[in-house]
Image (cartoon, rainbow, N blue to C red):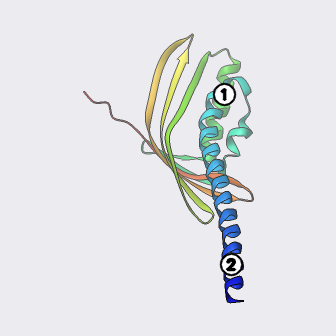
Amino acid sequence: MRCRWLCIVLLAGSFVGAGVSARAGQDEDAVHHTITQAVAGTAAFSESRDKQTILRLYTDDYAGIQDGQQETKAAIEQWLNEYESELKQGNRLRFIGAVSNLRTGFAGETAWALYDYVFQAIREGEVEGQDAGTCTSLLRKEHSAWRIFHDRCSKSKSVQ
Protein backbone atom coordinates (compact mmCIF):
# COMPACT_ATOMS: atom_id res chain seq x y z
CA MET A 1 0.00 0.00 0.00
CA ARG A 2 2.80 2.39 0.90
CA CYS A 3 4.48 1.68 -2.46
CA ARG A 4 1.29 2.41 -4.39
CA TRP A 5 0.84 5.73 -2.49
CA LEU A 6 4.45 6.69 -3.25
CA CYS A 7 3.95 5.87 -6.94
CA ILE A 8 0.79 7.98 -7.07
CA VAL A 9 2.56 10.93 -5.41
CA LEU A 10 5.55 10.66 -7.74
CA LEU A 11 3.34 10.31 -10.80
CA ALA A 12 1.21 13.33 -9.77
CA GLY A 13 4.38 15.34 -9.14
CA SER A 14 5.67 14.56 -12.60
CA PHE A 15 2.44 15.89 -14.16
CA VAL A 16 2.61 19.06 -12.08
CA GLY A 17 6.29 19.51 -12.99
CA ALA A 18 5.52 19.02 -16.67
CA GLY A 19 2.75 21.64 -16.45
CA VAL A 20 5.02 24.14 -14.73
CA SER A 21 7.77 23.48 -17.27
CA ALA A 22 5.38 23.92 -20.20
CA ARG A 23 4.02 27.16 -18.71
CA ALA A 24 7.57 28.44 -18.13
CA GLY A 25 8.42 27.66 -21.76
CA GLN A 26 5.32 29.52 -22.93
CA ASP A 27 6.21 32.52 -20.76
CA GLU A 28 9.76 32.53 -22.09
CA ASP A 29 8.45 32.43 -25.67
CA ALA A 30 6.01 35.25 -24.87
CA VAL A 31 8.76 37.46 -23.38
CA HIS A 32 10.98 36.79 -26.41
CA HIS A 33 8.05 37.73 -28.64
CA THR A 34 7.40 40.99 -26.73
CA ILE A 35 11.03 42.09 -26.99
CA THR A 36 11.44 41.18 -30.66
CA GLN A 37 8.08 42.78 -31.51
CA ALA A 38 9.11 46.03 -29.83
CA VAL A 39 12.07 46.22 -32.23
CA ALA A 40 10.27 44.78 -35.28
CA GLY A 41 7.21 47.00 -34.78
CA THR A 42 9.35 50.11 -34.81
CA ALA A 43 11.19 48.92 -37.90
CA ALA A 44 7.90 48.07 -39.68
CA PHE A 45 6.12 51.27 -38.64
CA SER A 46 6.87 53.09 -41.90
CA GLU A 47 4.76 50.47 -43.70
CA SER A 48 2.13 49.58 -41.08
CA ARG A 49 1.60 52.97 -39.38
CA ASP A 50 0.11 50.89 -36.55
CA LYS A 51 1.02 52.69 -33.33
CA GLN A 52 -1.12 50.42 -31.14
CA THR A 53 0.86 47.32 -32.12
CA ILE A 54 3.91 48.98 -30.60
CA LEU A 55 2.28 50.80 -27.70
CA ARG A 56 0.44 47.75 -26.35
CA LEU A 57 3.83 46.13 -25.67
CA TYR A 58 4.42 48.73 -22.92
CA THR A 59 2.63 49.26 -19.61
CA ASP A 60 0.89 52.58 -18.98
CA ASP A 61 3.46 53.32 -16.27
CA TYR A 62 6.44 52.47 -18.50
CA ALA A 63 9.62 54.34 -17.56
CA GLY A 64 12.79 53.75 -19.52
CA ILE A 65 16.25 55.18 -19.94
CA GLN A 66 17.83 55.37 -23.39
CA ASP A 67 21.45 56.48 -23.23
CA GLY A 68 20.81 58.56 -20.14
CA GLN A 69 17.58 60.10 -21.43
CA GLN A 70 14.31 59.29 -19.68
CA GLU A 71 11.54 57.82 -21.78
CA THR A 72 7.84 57.20 -21.12
CA LYS A 73 5.06 55.54 -23.07
CA ALA A 74 3.80 59.04 -23.94
CA ALA A 75 7.24 59.89 -25.36
CA ILE A 76 7.18 56.75 -27.53
CA GLU A 77 3.72 57.70 -28.79
CA GLN A 78 4.88 61.27 -29.51
CA TRP A 79 7.88 59.97 -31.48
CA LEU A 80 5.60 57.67 -33.50
CA ASN A 81 3.23 60.59 -34.21
CA GLU A 82 6.12 62.79 -35.37
CA TYR A 83 7.60 60.02 -37.51
CA GLU A 84 4.19 59.31 -39.07
CA SER A 85 3.79 63.02 -39.86
CA GLU A 86 7.19 63.06 -41.55
CA LEU A 87 6.29 59.95 -43.55
CA LYS A 88 3.09 61.63 -44.75
CA GLN A 89 5.20 64.56 -45.94
CA GLY A 90 7.32 62.23 -48.06
CA ASN A 91 10.21 61.51 -45.71
CA ARG A 92 11.80 58.28 -46.97
CA LEU A 93 13.64 57.45 -43.74
CA ARG A 94 13.18 53.80 -42.74
CA PHE A 95 14.53 51.73 -39.89
CA ILE A 96 15.90 48.20 -39.68
CA GLY A 97 16.27 46.61 -36.26
CA ALA A 98 17.56 43.35 -34.86
CA VAL A 99 17.87 41.71 -31.45
CA SER A 100 20.55 39.17 -30.56
CA ASN A 101 21.85 37.33 -27.49
CA LEU A 102 18.39 37.48 -25.88
CA ARG A 103 18.41 35.95 -22.39
CA THR A 104 15.49 35.91 -19.97
CA GLY A 105 14.72 35.20 -16.34
CA PHE A 106 11.54 35.04 -14.27
CA ALA A 107 10.31 35.69 -10.74
CA GLY A 108 6.56 35.13 -10.54
CA GLU A 109 4.72 37.69 -12.65
CA THR A 110 7.93 39.62 -13.40
CA ALA A 111 10.49 38.85 -16.08
CA TRP A 112 13.72 40.38 -17.27
CA ALA A 113 15.37 40.26 -20.65
CA LEU A 114 18.97 41.11 -21.50
CA TYR A 115 19.86 41.56 -25.15
CA ASP A 116 21.93 43.34 -27.74
CA TYR A 117 20.29 45.48 -30.39
CA VAL A 118 21.19 47.09 -33.69
CA PHE A 119 19.12 49.77 -35.43
CA GLN A 120 19.97 51.23 -38.80
CA ALA A 121 18.43 54.33 -40.36
CA ILE A 122 18.07 53.87 -44.13
CA ARG A 123 17.23 56.56 -46.65
CA GLU A 124 17.13 55.93 -50.39
CA GLY A 125 18.84 52.57 -49.86
CA GLU A 126 21.81 54.10 -48.04
CA VAL A 127 22.65 53.64 -44.37
CA GLU A 128 22.29 57.05 -42.79
CA GLY A 129 23.09 56.02 -39.24
CA GLN A 130 23.49 53.06 -36.95
CA ASP A 131 22.83 52.56 -33.27
CA ALA A 132 23.97 49.42 -31.45
CA GLY A 133 24.03 48.59 -27.77
CA THR A 134 22.71 46.53 -24.92
CA CYS A 135 19.36 46.62 -23.11
CA THR A 136 17.91 45.26 -19.94
CA SER A 137 14.12 45.18 -19.99
CA LEU A 138 11.78 44.43 -17.12
CA LEU A 139 8.39 42.98 -17.98
CA ARG A 140 5.22 42.40 -16.01
CA LYS A 141 2.50 39.89 -16.81
CA GLU A 142 -0.76 41.79 -17.18
CA HIS A 143 -3.74 39.57 -17.79
CA SER A 144 -2.14 37.05 -20.13
CA ALA A 145 0.37 39.33 -21.86
CA TRP A 146 3.95 40.19 -20.94
CA ARG A 147 4.42 43.96 -21.20
CA ILE A 148 7.55 46.09 -20.77
CA PHE A 149 7.47 48.40 -17.74
CA HIS A 150 11.14 49.44 -17.76
CA ASP A 151 14.07 49.45 -20.20
CA ARG A 152 17.62 50.57 -19.70
CA CYS A 153 19.55 50.71 -22.96
CA SER A 154 23.02 51.99 -23.67
CA LYS A 155 24.88 52.38 -26.93
CA SER A 156 28.08 50.45 -27.36
CA LYS A 157 31.16 52.61 -27.31
CA SER A 158 33.22 52.35 -30.43
CA VAL A 159 36.71 50.97 -30.02
CA GLN A 160 39.41 53.05 -31.66
Work out which residue is located at the far bottom of the displayed protein and give it. Answer: 1
Q: Nearer the viewer, residue 141 or 130?
A: 141
In the rendered image, the quadrant that contains the C terminus is: top left
Which image quarter: residue 79? Answer: top right
Look at label 1 and name its amino acid. Ala
Q: Is residue 60 visible?
A: no
Residue 112: image x %, image y %?
Answer: 53, 55
Instruction: Tell me if 50 is positioned left or right of 137 in this view.
Output: right
Residue 148: image x %, image y %?
Answer: 61, 51
The residue lying at 46 percent from left, 22 percent from top is: 129
Which image quarter: residue 45? Answer: top right
Residue 63: image x %, image y %?
Answer: 55, 52
Say which mark, if any, is on residue 109: none
Instruction: Tell me if 54 is positioned left or right of 99 in this view.
Output: right
Relative vertical location of residue 36 with respect to residue 49 in this rendering, above or below: below
Relative vertical location of residue 140 with respect to residue 39 in this rendering, above or below: below
In the rendered image, the quadrant that contains the N terminus is: bottom right
Q: Nearer the viewer, residue 123 or 6?
A: 6
The residue wearing badge 1 is: 44
The residue wearing badge 2 is: 7
Relative vertical location of residue 28 with respect to residue 119 in this rendering, above or below: below
